[in-house]
Image (cartoon, helix red, strand yellow):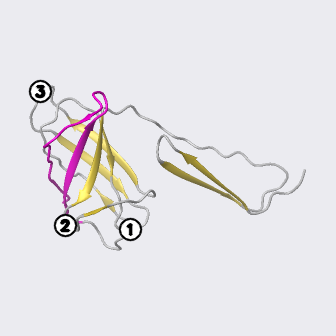
Amino acid sequence: MDKLRDTKMKVKLRDTKMKVKLRDTKMKDKLRDTKMKVKLRDTKMKVKLRDTRMKDKLEDTKMKDKLWDTKMKDKLGDTKMKVKLRDTKMKDKLWDTKMKDKLGDTKMKVKLEDTKMKDKLWDTKMKVKLEDTRKKDKLEDTKIKIKFE
């Protein structure tokens, strides 16, 4: 078989809005085993975080976001959540972010987008827009302030 050199592949997952680039160099005969793991979790709500200080959408597809639900209440009330954010460009981590909101027992997906700033995001107040995918209707007049500490 022919040798594959400097093979570049672009894969777009349109439904998940993720971009995956595979870059294989100096490969012989066959494509070696490439394992990709994509986890699609069912979420009842989608959350977009915007930086109100800059009034600009933060958009970076290279960021990895994890929302860890630590203490949820069955009824409406204050909810404490831990957000574990990892930015591959800035190479710092935001830990133990507490969100106070009036949300019931829900699963949420956080989409945090990067302003391409080369400094740490500290004391950033953001607004969260909630979208209920079950009802296919936006929850209006719901504002949540988040302060990274």
Residue type at mark 3 is Lys
Q: Front-most of 147 and 92?
A: 147
What residue lies at 26% left-to-right and 66% top-to-bottom? Answer: 121
Residue 104 location, quadrant? top left
Dot 1 or dot 3, earlier in sequence: 3
Residue 18 painted magenta: no
Per the image, the residue denoted by label 3 is: 75
Number of numbered discs overlaid on the protein picture: 3
Per the image, the residue denoted by label 1 is: 90
Residue type at mark 1 is Met
Per the image, the residue denoted by label 2 is: 53
Q: Nearer the viewer, mark 2 or mark 3?
A: 2
Residue 23 location, quadrant? bottom right
Q: Secondary structure at mark 2?
A: loop
Which stretch appears magenta? 122-149
Disc 1 to disc 2, C-alpha distance: 19 Å
Pointer 1 with pointer 2, Cβ within 8 A: no
Is residue 49 shown left or right of residue 78? right
